[in-house]
């Protein structure tokens, strides 16, 4: 075997109350695409933060090309040839692309020369990007390109990618993978963190699996099934969501030519959406991000009011009812953005439970808060959805993304909704937790709730939906039964005027 | 009423002087806010600078040493704010307000024995022939060095923020301290440096009032200029040149209303005295309609969690 590029042995890092990494060893050869797998909280992020110099290990050795490697800070790591693309982008919205890139470089050239370099690299790797644009105006995929190009300009030997595809459309994932394969062929090693096992199977050469901070196994992803990898991560057999097939009930929600302008300056208006949802039905809505998903959720939850007659729930026109009034009727929603939209970051879980649960769970009495009841409700959510947190008194911000996601979905599910609308219910959630969330949605449906799942994960939609429709530029395609839909047909429903080829999932 | 008593040349030269304390305070606060920190203690740092400068100038006989002491005094007081907000992670609004109250009290204490004394005068720069140019000469070339330093400071801050890496890093920290930290920039060091710079500038502005504009020492003599500076930064949309323009507007109207008072205009003095504050704010509110965004992390406490 050739000398490894990066060699970790016995790396340990403990935080108060939790050992994030326990005796972790890892080897990456030049040009190798190495996957790091594990559930939320398994210690993947801590491990890569140590390699990138953001966190110092308590014990253990790190070697880079045979020499001791202990970066004191990210500058040192970058100088040693380590580049990192962050899970939550480390970009500055108000600055231009070129300025953002200059900030992540050790010795950036003059702005004009840098702009030229950015253009060159973006051409070479097929990542179109204009250096003068303001980052705040870019799409998620374009923002990620900024991060990748920032790394590439430093000619890294090792590129760390922390869940790079969680915010990308299938098309953007394809572009990203082409770039990564090209890099790997040029000898750059890639350490790749993701929950999406199919992606790892198509991209990665080898994988290390972490569970509760310990290495529990290695595998070759191409020769291992996604199910086996998931079971190694979880440490037990994985349950596939199941449901009893049942005849759908009567129509409970009718959208009649629903049109609405977006509250957001760069948003997508909804255009003449008509669809019916029945009791016990799961309607899956796919589509490339930014085609009206947020706007549709807002219109259904009552954040955006629409013209009379557009929304009928249970025979009643709810177009002009606000979110609280709709909640009282049983129309609940869980938006995509966890921090700041679905939950208030600095409030405790009890308070967050109170915020949406007050009306239906009776957590307030004539304007006075019932703290005991609210705490019970929050504890019920934590228990039922296996939210990993010390208790309901902790701030929403302190939970990891996946755990908070379980909490915000659980909070709505446990309120016995008549109609539940969720957007990206399993975004950033590991395989077993995602399966649990999907199972909860299916259980709701078999108890007669109408469920609308808006998601960009087509596998997820195919797994749980009865009917499928796609959003495209604010318009909803006709619904079709999900069973028997082929990838090609879905692509056509989603693609519409985009004229782009849909990734083969 | 006799408007002909107002000499236009002296008027323009006078408003350049009236605007200078505001320019210093505003440009310092602009840099602080660009780094993402809201320091409401400008008034306190100004008055502290005013008395430190005044006392030093009187004791040493050197106005320039006085200005140096004013900058140091303002910076030392701002260090207290930096400690509270960057180390102890206290709330920035509360810390800033208490800094103002503290500065006002401290300056009154130091200044007890300086009331009624005349400070040494800082001479104007000798521009030679330039000062003899009609109109332009008396307006622009009959001032002390600190006034020119103020304008140079605005140009300097503008250039640093726009063209240099240091300026880019400062803006980046103010925009998203989490992202800057992730890239390995020392958020607290950068912010503390910015706070010190803001304190020194505010101190200089205060000393300009006590040593040149008035020149004498009275308690509370900054009279709300620090608060105007804070408003100016916001309404100038965090743009240095626009802050300079706003300062001149304020200085101009201050000077004009003083002249009008002198000329005996039949408007109650109180209305004249409040006019600079009102008009400056109205004009700046109108100007700031373009919604140039504030630094996104402004006023938020940064804590590097693991």
Image (cartoon, rainbow, N blue to C red):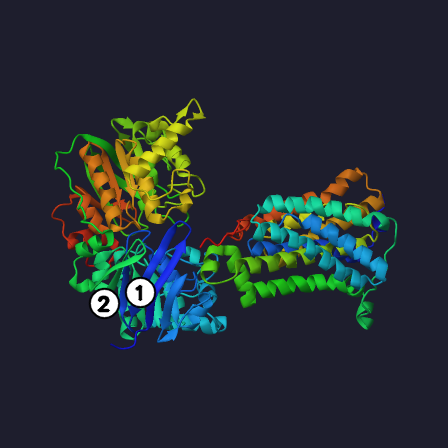
Q: Is residue A3 left or right of residue B135?
A: left
- In the rendered view, tell whether residue B4 sits above or below residue B142: above
Q: At 78% from the left edge and 57% from the top edge, which residue is drawn?
A: B53
Report the quarter where the C terminus of chain A lies. Answer: bottom left
Picture quadrant where residue A132 is located: bottom left
Q: Which mark is residue A205?
A: 2
- The residue positioned farthest toward the right in the image shown: B117
Are discs 2 and 1 less than 8 Å apart at CB? no
Label 2 or label 1, whichever comes before in sequence order: 1
Between A115 and B268, the residue placed more toward the observer is A115
Q: Which residue is mark 1?
A: A25
Neighbour tally class for label 1: few under 14, some 14-19, many 20 plus, Cα within 10 Å: some
* Quadrant the N terminus of chain A occupies: bottom left
Which residue occupies the extreme top position in the image?
A: A366
Q: Is residue A61 left or right of residue B269?
A: left
Distance, label 2 to label 1, CA atoms, is 17 Å
Residue at the spot 72% in from the left edge and 59% down from the top edge:
B71
Q: Relative to A229, does residue A439 appear above or below in the rendering? A: above
The reply to whether residue B184 is visible in this rendering is: yes
Q: Nearer the viewer, mark 2 or mark 1?
A: 1
Q: Exactly how many numbered labels are in the figure?
A: 2
Q: Is residue A322 above or below residue B31?
A: above
> Residue A461: horizontal and vertical position, in percent?
21, 47
Q: Nearer the viewer, residue B168 or A362?
A: A362
- The chain to which mark 2 is attached is A
| Coordinates of residue A136 in the picture (x, y in percent) | 43, 55
Disc 1: which chain?
A
Q: Secondary structure at mark 1?
A: strand
Frontmost residue, A204 versus A377:
A377
Q: Would you say residue B10 is visible in this rendering?
A: no
Q: Which mark is residue A310?
A: none
Identify the image quadrant of residue A453: top left
């Amino acid at each position: 075997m050739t000398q490894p590029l990066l060699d970790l042995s016995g790396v340990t890092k403990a935080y108060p109350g939790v050992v994030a990494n326990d005796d972790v060893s890892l080897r990456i050869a030049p040009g190798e695409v190495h996957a790091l797998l594990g559930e939320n909280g398994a210690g993947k992020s801590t491990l890569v933060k140590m390699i990138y110099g953001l966190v110092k290990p308590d014990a253990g050795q790190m070697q880079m090309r045979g020499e001791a490697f202990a970066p004191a800070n990210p500058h040192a790591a970058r100088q040693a040839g380590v580049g990192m693309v962050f899970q939550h982008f480390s970009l500055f919205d108000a600055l231009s692309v070129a300025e953002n890139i200059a900030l992540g470089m050790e010795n950036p050239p003059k702005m004009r020369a840098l702009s030229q370099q950015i253009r060159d690299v973006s051409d070479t790797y097929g990542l179109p990007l204009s250096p003068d644009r303001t980052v705040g105006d870019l799409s998620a995929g374009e923002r990620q390109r900024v991060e990748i190009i920032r790394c590439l300009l430093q000619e890294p030997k090792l590129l760390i990618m922390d869940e790079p595809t969680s915010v990308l459309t299938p098309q953007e994932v394809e572009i990203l993978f082409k770039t990564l394969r090209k890099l790997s062929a040029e000898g750059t090693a890639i350490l790749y963190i993701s929950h999406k096992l199919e992606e790892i199977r198509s991209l990665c050469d080898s994988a290390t699996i972490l569970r509760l901070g310990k290495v529990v196994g290695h595998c070759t992803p191409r020769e291992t099934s996604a199910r086996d990898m998931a079971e190694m991560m979880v440490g037990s057999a994985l349950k596939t969501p199941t449901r009893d097939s049942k005849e759908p009930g009567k129509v409970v929600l009718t959208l009649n030519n629903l049109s609405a302008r977006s509250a957001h300056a760069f948003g997508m208006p909804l255009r003449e959406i008509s669809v019916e949802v029945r009791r016990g039905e799961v309607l899956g809505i796919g589509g490339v991000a930014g085609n009206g998903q947020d706007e549709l959720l807002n219109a259904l939850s009552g954040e955006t009011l629409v013209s009379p007659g557009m929304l009928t729930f249970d025979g009643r026109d709810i177009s002009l009812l606000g979110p609280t009034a709709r909640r009282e009727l049983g129309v609940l929603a869980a938006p995509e953005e966890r921090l700041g939209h679905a939950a208030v970051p600095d409030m405790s879980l009890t308070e967050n439970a109170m915020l949406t649960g007050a009306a239906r769970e009776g957590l307030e009495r004539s304007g006075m808060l019932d703290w005991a009841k609210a705490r019970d409700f929050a504890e019920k959510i934590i228990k039922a959805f296996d939210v990993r947190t010390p208790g309901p008194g902790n701030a929403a911000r302190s939970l990891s993304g996946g755990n908070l996601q379980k909490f915000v979905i659980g909070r709505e599910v446990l309120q016995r909704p008549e109609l539940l609308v969720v957007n990206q219910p399993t975004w950033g959630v590991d395989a077993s937790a995602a399966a649990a969330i999907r199972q909860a949605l299916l259980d709701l449906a078999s108890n007669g709730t109408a469920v609308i799942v808006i998601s960009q994960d087509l596998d997820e939609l195919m797994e749980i939906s009865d009917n499928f429709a796609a959003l495209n530029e604010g318009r909803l395609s006709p619904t079709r039964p999900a069973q028997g839909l082929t990838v090609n047909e879905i692509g056509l429903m989603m693609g519409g005027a985009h004229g782009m080829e849909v990734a083969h999932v | 009423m006799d408007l002909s008593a107002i000499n236009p040349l002296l008027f323009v030269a006078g408003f350049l002087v009236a605007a200078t304390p505001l320019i210093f305070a505003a440009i310092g606060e602009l840099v602080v806010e660009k780094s993402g920190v809201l320091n409401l203690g400008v008034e306190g740092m100004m008055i502290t600078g005013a008395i430190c400068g005044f006392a030093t100038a009187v004791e040493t006989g050197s106005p320039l040493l006085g200005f140096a002491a004013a900058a140091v005094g303002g910076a030392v007081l701002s260090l207290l704010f930096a400690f509270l907000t960057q180390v102890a992670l206290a709330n920035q609004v509360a810390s800033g307000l208490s800094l103002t109250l503290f500065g006002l009290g401290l300056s009154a204490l130091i200044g007890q024995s300086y009331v009624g004394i005349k400070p040494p005068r800082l001479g104007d720069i000798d521009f030679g022939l330039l000062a003899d140019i009609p109109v332009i000469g008396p307006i622009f070339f009959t001032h002390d060095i600190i006034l020119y330093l103020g304008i140079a400071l605005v140009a300097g801050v503008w250039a640093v923020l726009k063209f240099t890496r240091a300026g880019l890093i400062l803006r980046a920290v103010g925009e998203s301290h989490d992202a800057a930290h992730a890239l390995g920039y020392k958020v607290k060091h950068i912010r503390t440096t910015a706070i010190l710079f803001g304190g020194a500038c505010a101190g200089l502005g205060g000393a300009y009032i006590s040593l040149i504009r008035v020149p004498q020492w009275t308690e509370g003599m900054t009279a709300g200029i620090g608060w105007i500076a804070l408003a100016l930064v916001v309404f100038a949309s965090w743009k240095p040149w626009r802050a300079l323009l706003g300062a001149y507007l304020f200085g101009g109207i201050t000077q004009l209303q003083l002249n009008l008072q002198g000329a005996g205009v039949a408007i109650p003095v109180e209305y004249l005295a409040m006019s600079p504050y009102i008009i400056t704010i109205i004009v700046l509110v109108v100007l700031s309609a373009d919604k140039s965004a504030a630094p996104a992390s402004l006023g938020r406490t940064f804590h590097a969690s693991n």
